Amino acid sequence: MTDIVTAGHCHDGASTASLDARVFIPRDAPLTWNPEDVAGSTWSDGEMPLVSIIMPVHNAAPFLQDAIDSILAQTHKGPMELIVFDDGPSTDHSRAILESNRSVLAARGITLKIVAERTATTLGSSTDSQGTKSYFDDSNLTETSLDSSTDSHQTETILDRSTNGHGDCFRNAYSGHCRENDGGGGSVHCDGCDSLSACGSNGDSSSIRLSSIGGSGGSAETGTALRGAPLLSEGSAERCQPRGCGFGRNRAIEHSRGEYLCFADGDDVMAPGRISRQLALASQSHKLLVRIDAAAGENFWWSKLLLASPSHKLLVGSNFVRTPADATPRLTAWANSLSQVQLYLQQLVETTLIAPTWFCSRQVFKTAGPFDESGPGTPDDLMFFHQHLANGGWLAKVPEPLLTYCFHSASVTGSRGCPWESIWEQRVKHLQAQLLSGPSGPCWSEFTIWNAGKEGRRLYRSLSPSNQAKVIAFCDVDVRKIARGVYMHHESGRAVPVIHWSEARPPLLLCVKRGLTGGGFEEIVESLDMTEGLDYVYFS
């Protein structure tokens, strides 16, 4: 049998009561994985499932080709599809780069779908004051050359509305001169632009016209449109505003067909073995239950029922390389150092599996999703991660760097990152729901906050009154803070003692940022005769 430890029992049958009592660990969660099993796929070539690569993109042109090249270089030989949501859509050359790789991806057996959003108040059978949101993917579009009187670079786009599930969607050319036609045809057209960049055509077209579709039945009218042009809102010269990664991932997943989902960003580079390694790990629990079931002598159909269940709980990640190397060094070192058990135990700090490394079955998304769609500035990945854990979901990672995670001014973690206040609010919400309220499992009735400084006091103020009452003390190493004796919370009038760390009574909530004390704080924690998850939990 595979060497596996769950929260309740070791592989040799010995009791692990201490593990069972740790906070955050699902009782049925595997805590170790056999490296030999993870090293190779559990699927034979003929039965490999479809893997959908989910990629939201917004103005990723400088990095997108490298991301696509890394997909083409995957050692995984099973079926794959790349589903790109073009958020906004992009105003740079992202679409052109995607289109230029369509045939290369197809030759590799990878289907490319590009999905974007448009808002139309004149289309569809059910509109409201906000307009009807519709989406298109171009997997059903074909092109034929126009007659010889047209520019040789122009193409005719024929829309197949019968198979994409969005009958009123159509490709709309973006141009600074586009406007609604007052002639009653509902068309959006461009009279021509002096600048190719203003028209977004990248040299592909100098005259763009696209006719709308009137109703859910019948065939689409045809018009000229540049291949891969961004969308424009009906009757407006304004583009849709970027909706954020959560929105983009949801739309891409809606248009995907894969049994497994591989999350990626348009500016990150996968290692060649990423999909094969993560698919092997995500499907390993299939094999575990088959073996257990075979040993029990149950019948084939019961084995098949068990086969479908475990991987539907498992979110897989991996270690990663950060580029440039000096970007978020503490986060990188922390995330890459986490053990399998710490993926659960340190969930209050951050997503212990970094979102661009996620890989899971579609059922994981259905259970924990969809992603929050509040827009840029929302920690939608953290919210999804917390919901997955609240549902009793499992975590695992390949302890090798399978992704080069890019940081730059236009990246999600750069200019479009989340305000720290939003992240803080979500972390405190998860802390209170999963540790202090305890809907299932251990619940702290009292605890000590390790940090009498700014961050510790902020955490105290962020707690609900009932959870503030559970704080029996602050502890610290700073003699100046300890000398104050108490922290006075003026809103409630409550005085909380401030004591030396050596006098603190567990459980402790560690609210000290690591990597900033020259190793001093870490040495103190290591010297304590305490167990992580039982006697203390990290919040920072």
Image: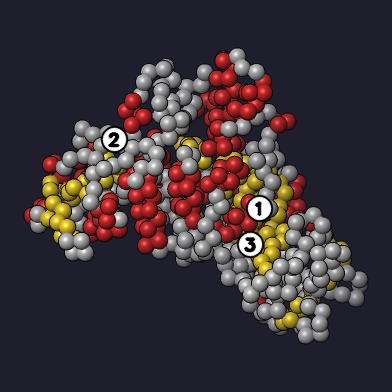
Question: Residue at (72%, 64%) from the top-left corner?
Answer: 228
Instruction: Tell me the kind of residue under disc 2.
Output: Leu
Query: Which one is earlier in the sequence, the residue at label 2 or at label 1?
Result: 1
Instruction: Please say if 218 is above or below 321.
Output: below
Report, in whole angstroms, how far the alpha carbon at label 1 lies from the one at label 3: 14 Å
Instruction: Please say if 265 is above or below 94.
Output: above
Q: Are marks 2 and 3 in contact (CB under 8 Å)?
A: no
Q: What residue sits right under mark 3 in the picture?
A: 86
| Outermost residue toward the right in this view | 148
- Mark 1 is surrounded, within 10 Å at the Cα level, by few (under 14), some (14 to 19) or many (20 or more) other residues, namely few
Q: What residue sits right under mark 1 in the picture?
A: 254
Report, in whole angstroms, how far the alpha carbon at label 2 lies from the one at label 1: 41 Å
28 vs 453, left or right, is right
Give the camera-side residue of 62 and 309: 309
Q: What residue sits right under mark 2 in the picture?
A: 534
Question: Residue at (49%, 56%) from the top-left corner?
Answer: 380
